[in-house]
Image (spheres, grey):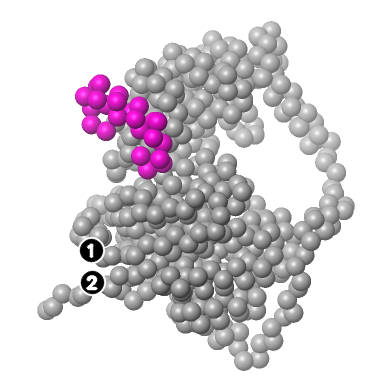
Amino acid sequence: MEDRPDPSPLKIAAAQLPAACGDVRTNVARVVDMLECAQQEGVQLVVFPELFLTGEEPDLVRFDPSSYAIHEKDARLDPIVAACERTGVAAIVGAATHERANLYNSLLVFGASGELWATYHKQHLFPDEVDVYERGEHAYVLHWGDWKFGLGISSDAAFPEHAAAAAGMECHAYLVGARFGGEAGGYAPHAWMAARARENAMYVLMADHGAQDAGGGSAAWGPDGQLLAQAPDQGLHLVSITLAFSRLREVGLRAPMSDEQFQARMRRRPRFDHVPLQSLRQRRGDDYTPPVIKAPVDVSVVFAEMLANPKPPSAQQLAQWAEEARMWELLKDGCVEELEREAARRQGFPHGADDSPDRPWIGEAINSGALETVAWMISKNVDLSFVDPEGYSAVMLALERKSDQRDKYAILDLLLRSGAPTDRHGVNFWTAMHLAAVRDDVEGLRLLRQYGADLRAISYDYTTSTPAEDARHANSWKALAFLEQAALEDALPT
């Protein structure tokens, strides 16, 4: 029996371009323009950013789904269908979608012959999305000849099992539509993508929006986790790579996985749906009449309508807000006498947790309180070994401290002197060393090393991603230089 020939090389690209706020028609036109550019570059498949057709406007989408979300038989998609058919370029486009009275954060998959092949719904929502969108229940594998692609949307890639499921279905690449803002970029999306590529020995392509608040440019990684191409943080760009099966073979992708390896990667395996190809025209039926497309709206007018009859807060809400503000000021002031009075008045203070966001009081103090407040709580023997609901340990919260940067390292030093664990795994399955490395925080790394943090800590229990490796993938060069020098001094491999 002859060996099956390798798939032919395939050129794919990530489109980086900002979306027009709430203006589906304009965004559709931008997709069409980018597909024309892709054809000229010889690209056969283009991935667009998350929520691109609708823009990231959850209030608009929730207020009027028929106008601001994409629905079945939506005639506004016709120009994209026609452009794919005309150029022979397939497109994967982010949009808010409306199905059976539910809203989803989705990727629409358009074939090169002008067919809407499938819709993938985001499975791992950010906390601020759960009130707007439903979680997707199924993953999707895109078949392109002999190539297979797994799809993801932004924070899907933060969960190793999501990409591992695609690898388990023998996908050759993981395609991600994203919209990381400046603050969301703090989640280190490039480190996520590099890790997903390296863990699963497959290509990763991420399309970001490149607007003013972009958290990182669109980029592509090889199956060894190395960065292949990257756009600047902002502006219109088409980041293209050519998939080569020979490179996958070099890192052993086609070597069969053992059952143990597969199960280790599939802790919470998503289900895969293989949606049959069906053209948009077939789905509509012959008697379908396209709706009249509305003119672009003035978003300010829509918000004015939403705010015309605001529901006043209840007395209970007002009292709760006043109490939250009082506690905030108490933690910021750091007055020991007032803190002692509060401990006598409030049950569970400072040893308990704030009701919202259910973070230990010591965590709230580390995050935004005064150094004196943190010292007082430590003198009361509060537990420093916690990991809060967002995945942050005490030491991680100090590294991420946003309020009063002058006290940041004093608080970190105090926590470490007081025995706060240095190597607990938290957000992104990182230790504090990984977090400081990705943030390029050399002073944080220095303090962690001084108090015995593990330079060789791994970020996941089935890979060998060290702080130095994550610093390299995040382009945190100062942190990488510090870690490499520390490793030389300690005679440890990085």
Classify 10 Å Cα crowding around label 2: few (below 14), some (14-19), many (20 and above).
Answer: few
Classify 10 Å Cα crowding around label 1: few (below 14), some (14-19), many (20 and above).
Answer: few
Res 281 quadrant in image: bottom right
Q: Residue at x 44, y 22 (%)?
A: 443
Q: Main secondary structure of the magenta part?
A: helix
Work out which residue is located at the far front of the displayed protein and give it: 40
Q: Which residue is mark 2?
A: 6
Work out which residue is located at the far top of the displayed protein and give it: 337
Q: Which residue is mark 1?
A: 246
Please indicate whether residue 167 sits to the left or right of residue 444 in the image.
Answer: left
Residue 325, relative to residue 473: is it above or below?
above
Q: Is residue 440 magenta?
A: no
Q: Which residues are magenta?
A: 472-494
Can residue 454 be seen at all in this image of the molecule?
Answer: yes
Q: Residue at x 37, y 43 (%)?
A: 473
- Give the quarter of the figure containing the C terminus: top left
Residue 263 in picture, x, y percent from top left: 30, 53
